[in-house]
Image (cartoon, rainbow, N blue to C red):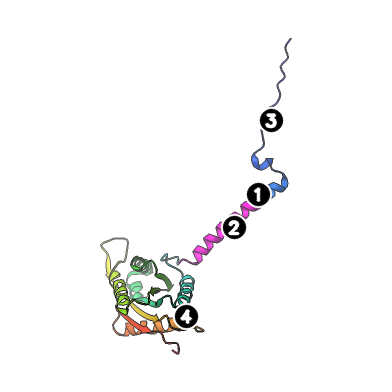
Amino acid sequence: MEITLDYPKIKAPPPEQALAPEAQRLAELQARIKQLETENVRLRELALTDELTGLKSRRAILDSLDQEIDRANRGKIKLCAVYIDVDNFKKVNTDYGHEQGDEVLRKVAEKLKNGTRKADSLGRLSGDEFLLLVPLDPDEQEEDLENILQRHIEAVRQVNRSNRPEEFIDQTISLGCVIVSPEISLAENMAKKIKEQADQALSSSKAAGKSRFVIAHYHPTF
Protein backbone atom coordinates (compact mmCIF):
# COMPACT_ATOMS: atom_id res chain seq x y z
CA MET A 1 0.00 0.00 0.00
CA GLU A 2 1.47 3.34 -1.07
CA ILE A 3 1.25 6.13 1.48
CA THR A 4 1.52 9.77 0.34
CA LEU A 5 2.44 12.29 2.94
CA ASP A 6 0.87 15.72 2.38
CA TYR A 7 3.32 18.23 3.82
CA PRO A 8 1.96 21.75 4.41
CA LYS A 9 3.36 24.33 2.04
CA ILE A 10 5.43 26.96 3.74
CA LYS A 11 5.37 30.39 2.09
CA ALA A 12 8.51 32.46 2.13
CA PRO A 13 8.08 35.60 4.27
CA PRO A 14 7.95 38.95 2.49
CA PRO A 15 11.39 40.50 2.05
CA GLU A 16 10.87 42.98 4.87
CA GLN A 17 9.92 40.15 7.27
CA ALA A 18 12.92 38.13 6.19
CA LEU A 19 15.27 40.83 7.41
CA ALA A 20 16.92 40.51 10.75
CA PRO A 21 15.37 42.87 13.33
CA GLU A 22 18.38 45.23 13.21
CA ALA A 23 18.39 45.35 9.42
CA GLN A 24 14.65 45.90 9.32
CA ARG A 25 14.88 48.80 11.74
CA LEU A 26 17.69 50.32 9.67
CA ALA A 27 15.62 50.00 6.49
CA GLU A 28 12.64 51.65 8.19
CA LEU A 29 14.86 54.46 9.48
CA GLN A 30 16.33 55.07 6.03
CA ALA A 31 12.86 55.15 4.48
CA ARG A 32 11.72 57.66 7.12
CA ILE A 33 14.76 59.87 6.52
CA LYS A 34 14.08 59.87 2.78
CA GLN A 35 10.43 60.76 3.43
CA LEU A 36 11.47 63.67 5.68
CA GLU A 37 13.96 64.93 3.11
CA THR A 38 11.26 64.93 0.43
CA GLU A 39 8.89 66.79 2.74
CA ASN A 40 11.58 69.35 3.60
CA VAL A 41 12.18 70.03 -0.09
CA ARG A 42 8.44 70.51 -0.61
CA LEU A 43 8.15 72.88 2.37
CA ARG A 44 11.17 74.89 1.20
CA GLU A 45 9.64 75.27 -2.26
CA LEU A 46 6.41 76.49 -0.65
CA ALA A 47 8.31 79.01 1.46
CA LEU A 48 10.14 80.37 -1.58
CA THR A 49 7.08 80.56 -3.84
CA ASP A 50 4.28 83.10 -3.65
CA GLU A 51 1.06 81.13 -3.34
CA LEU A 52 -1.11 83.49 -5.40
CA THR A 53 1.15 84.26 -8.36
CA GLY A 54 3.66 81.43 -8.44
CA LEU A 55 6.50 83.96 -8.48
CA LYS A 56 9.30 84.07 -5.95
CA SER A 57 8.09 84.87 -2.46
CA ARG A 58 9.16 88.02 -0.60
CA ARG A 59 11.81 86.04 1.22
CA ALA A 60 13.14 84.46 -1.96
CA ILE A 61 13.33 87.67 -4.03
CA LEU A 62 15.05 89.54 -1.19
CA ASP A 63 17.57 86.68 -0.96
CA SER A 64 18.13 87.12 -4.71
CA LEU A 65 18.69 90.85 -4.14
CA ASP A 66 21.46 90.08 -1.64
CA GLN A 67 23.07 87.69 -4.14
CA GLU A 68 22.92 90.21 -6.98
CA ILE A 69 24.38 92.94 -4.74
CA ASP A 70 27.32 90.64 -4.07
CA ARG A 71 27.78 89.99 -7.79
CA ALA A 72 27.66 93.70 -8.55
CA ASN A 73 30.21 94.35 -5.82
CA ARG A 74 32.59 91.90 -7.47
CA GLY A 75 32.34 93.95 -10.66
CA LYS A 76 30.49 91.28 -12.61
CA ILE A 77 27.24 93.11 -13.35
CA LYS A 78 25.37 96.38 -13.19
CA LEU A 79 22.37 95.69 -10.99
CA CYS A 80 18.98 97.26 -11.65
CA ALA A 81 16.41 96.86 -8.88
CA VAL A 82 12.89 97.67 -10.06
CA TYR A 83 9.87 98.23 -7.82
CA ILE A 84 6.63 97.52 -9.71
CA ASP A 85 3.23 98.63 -8.45
CA VAL A 86 -0.18 97.86 -9.96
CA ASP A 87 -1.90 101.21 -10.50
CA ASN A 88 -5.27 101.83 -8.86
CA PHE A 89 -5.45 98.30 -7.51
CA LYS A 90 -7.67 99.33 -4.62
CA LYS A 91 -10.24 100.48 -7.19
CA VAL A 92 -9.98 97.12 -8.97
CA ASN A 93 -10.92 95.37 -5.73
CA THR A 94 -13.74 97.84 -5.10
CA ASP A 95 -15.22 97.65 -8.61
CA TYR A 96 -14.78 93.93 -9.30
CA GLY A 97 -14.29 92.30 -5.90
CA HIS A 98 -11.27 90.74 -4.22
CA GLU A 99 -11.58 87.47 -6.12
CA GLN A 100 -11.26 89.28 -9.44
CA GLY A 101 -8.56 91.46 -7.90
CA ASP A 102 -6.54 88.29 -7.23
CA GLU A 103 -7.12 87.27 -10.84
CA VAL A 104 -5.72 90.60 -12.02
CA LEU A 105 -2.63 90.07 -9.86
CA ARG A 106 -2.14 86.61 -11.31
CA LYS A 107 -2.47 87.93 -14.85
CA VAL A 108 -0.09 90.84 -14.21
CA ALA A 109 2.43 88.43 -12.67
CA GLU A 110 2.11 86.11 -15.67
CA LYS A 111 2.74 88.92 -18.15
CA LEU A 112 5.69 90.23 -16.17
CA LYS A 113 7.18 86.75 -15.91
CA ASN A 114 6.77 86.18 -19.65
CA GLY A 115 8.74 89.37 -20.25
CA THR A 116 11.68 88.56 -18.01
CA ARG A 117 14.96 87.35 -19.39
CA LYS A 118 16.67 84.19 -18.15
CA ALA A 119 19.06 86.21 -15.99
CA ASP A 120 16.30 88.29 -14.38
CA SER A 121 14.58 87.56 -11.07
CA LEU A 122 10.97 88.44 -10.30
CA GLY A 123 9.08 88.15 -7.04
CA ARG A 124 6.05 89.47 -5.22
CA LEU A 125 6.90 91.66 -2.27
CA SER A 126 3.40 92.15 -0.89
CA GLY A 127 -0.10 92.98 -2.07
CA ASP A 128 0.17 94.54 -5.52
CA GLU A 129 3.90 95.25 -5.35
CA PHE A 130 6.61 93.28 -7.16
CA LEU A 131 10.40 93.40 -7.27
CA LEU A 132 12.25 92.80 -10.52
CA LEU A 133 16.03 92.36 -10.57
CA VAL A 134 17.68 93.05 -13.92
CA PRO A 135 21.42 92.33 -14.07
CA LEU A 136 23.12 94.07 -16.99
CA ASP A 137 26.60 93.63 -18.37
CA PRO A 138 28.79 96.66 -17.61
CA ASP A 139 28.83 97.59 -21.31
CA GLU A 140 25.02 97.61 -21.62
CA GLN A 141 23.55 101.09 -21.76
CA GLU A 142 20.74 102.71 -19.83
CA GLU A 143 18.77 102.72 -23.05
CA ASP A 144 18.77 98.92 -22.97
CA LEU A 145 17.22 99.05 -19.50
CA GLU A 146 14.64 101.58 -20.63
CA ASN A 147 13.54 99.24 -23.41
CA ILE A 148 13.13 96.39 -20.93
CA LEU A 149 11.04 98.50 -18.56
CA GLN A 150 8.85 99.87 -21.34
CA ARG A 151 8.15 96.35 -22.61
CA HIS A 152 6.88 95.39 -19.17
CA ILE A 153 4.57 98.41 -19.08
CA GLU A 154 3.16 97.58 -22.50
CA ALA A 155 2.74 93.89 -21.65
CA VAL A 156 0.14 94.53 -18.97
CA ARG A 157 -1.90 97.18 -20.79
CA GLN A 158 -4.80 94.76 -20.91
CA VAL A 159 -5.37 91.94 -18.46
CA ASN A 160 -8.35 89.69 -17.93
CA ARG A 161 -10.47 90.53 -14.91
CA SER A 162 -12.18 87.15 -15.10
CA ASN A 163 -11.84 83.78 -16.79
CA ARG A 164 -13.96 85.02 -19.70
CA PRO A 165 -11.56 86.17 -22.45
CA GLU A 166 -13.82 89.00 -23.61
CA GLU A 167 -13.66 90.80 -20.26
CA PHE A 168 -10.67 93.10 -20.05
CA ILE A 169 -9.76 96.13 -18.02
CA ASP A 170 -7.29 98.85 -18.95
CA GLN A 171 -4.61 98.02 -16.39
CA THR A 172 -1.35 99.90 -15.93
CA ILE A 173 1.72 99.57 -13.75
CA SER A 174 4.27 102.06 -12.45
CA LEU A 175 7.96 101.28 -12.02
CA GLY A 176 10.75 102.76 -9.93
CA CYS A 177 14.27 101.61 -10.78
CA VAL A 178 17.63 102.03 -9.08
CA ILE A 179 20.86 101.23 -10.93
CA VAL A 180 23.76 99.96 -8.84
CA SER A 181 27.04 100.39 -10.73
CA PRO A 182 29.75 97.69 -10.45
CA GLU A 183 32.21 100.08 -8.82
CA ILE A 184 29.89 100.69 -5.85
CA SER A 185 31.45 99.25 -2.69
CA LEU A 186 29.49 96.83 -0.56
CA ALA A 187 28.08 98.63 2.46
CA GLU A 188 26.06 97.88 5.57
CA ASN A 189 22.29 97.89 5.02
CA MET A 190 22.88 98.22 1.29
CA ALA A 191 19.84 96.12 0.38
CA LYS A 192 17.66 98.29 2.59
CA LYS A 193 18.99 101.48 0.98
CA ILE A 194 18.43 100.09 -2.51
CA LYS A 195 14.82 99.25 -1.63
CA GLU A 196 14.26 102.70 -0.17
CA GLN A 197 15.67 104.43 -3.25
CA ALA A 198 13.68 102.21 -5.61
CA ASP A 199 10.55 102.97 -3.59
CA GLN A 200 11.26 106.70 -3.89
CA ALA A 201 11.69 106.32 -7.65
CA LEU A 202 8.36 104.49 -7.74
CA SER A 203 6.70 107.33 -5.86
CA SER A 204 8.08 109.77 -8.43
CA SER A 205 6.67 107.60 -11.20
CA LYS A 206 3.24 107.63 -9.56
CA ALA A 207 3.36 111.39 -9.04
CA ALA A 208 4.27 111.93 -12.70
CA GLY A 209 1.06 110.28 -13.87
CA LYS A 210 1.55 106.50 -13.48
CA SER A 211 2.00 103.96 -16.28
CA ARG A 212 5.64 104.94 -16.61
CA PHE A 213 9.06 104.37 -15.09
CA VAL A 214 11.59 106.51 -13.28
CA ILE A 215 15.27 105.53 -13.16
CA ALA A 216 17.65 106.68 -10.44
CA HIS A 217 21.26 105.82 -9.65
CA TYR A 218 22.12 104.32 -6.31
CA HIS A 219 23.72 106.69 -3.85
CA PRO A 220 25.35 105.14 -0.75
CA THR A 221 24.72 108.21 1.42
CA PHE A 222 21.00 108.35 0.64
Label 3, label 4: how far apart the Cα atoms are: 71 Å
Q: Is residue 104 above or below residue 207?
A: above
Label 2, label 3: how far apart the Cα atoms are: 37 Å
Quadrant for residue 166, please give it: bottom left
Question: Please, what is the three-letter code of the amino acid marked with disc 4?
Answer: Ala
- Of 53 and 90, which appears nearest the observer? 53
Residue at left offset 68%, top offset 40%:
18
Write down the residue under mark 1: 27
Q: Which residue lies furthest to the left in this view?
A: 166
Question: Please, what is the three-letter code of the amino acid marked with disc 1?
Answer: Ala
Write down the residue under mark 3: 10
Q: Which of marks 3 and 4 is nearer the N terminus?
A: 3
Q: Which of marks 4 and 1 is nearer the N terminus?
A: 1
Residue at left offset 45%, top offset 87%:
220
**Mark 3 in CB contact with mark 4 (< 8 angstroms):** no
Quadrant for residue 196, please give it: bottom left
- Of 119 and 107, which appears nearest the observer? 119
Task: Provide residue 194's location: percent of width, then percent of height.
Answer: 44, 82
Mark 3 against mark 4, which lies toward the viewer? Answer: 4
Local packing at callout 1 (Cα closer than 10 Å; few below 14, some 14-19, many 20+) is some
Local packing at callout 4 (Cα closer than 10 Å; few below 14, some 14-19, many 20+) is some
Task: Provide residue 157's location: percent of width, then percent of height.
Answer: 27, 71
Residue at left offset 42%, top offset 71%:
124
Find out whether residue 16 is within the magenta segment: no
Badge 2 element: helix
| Boundaries of the magenta span | 27-49
Badge 4 element: helix
Asked if residue 36 shows in the view, the reply is: yes
Q: Earlier in the sequence, mark 2 or mark 4?
A: 2
Q: Considering the whole magenta stretch, tell me its main secondary structure.
A: helix
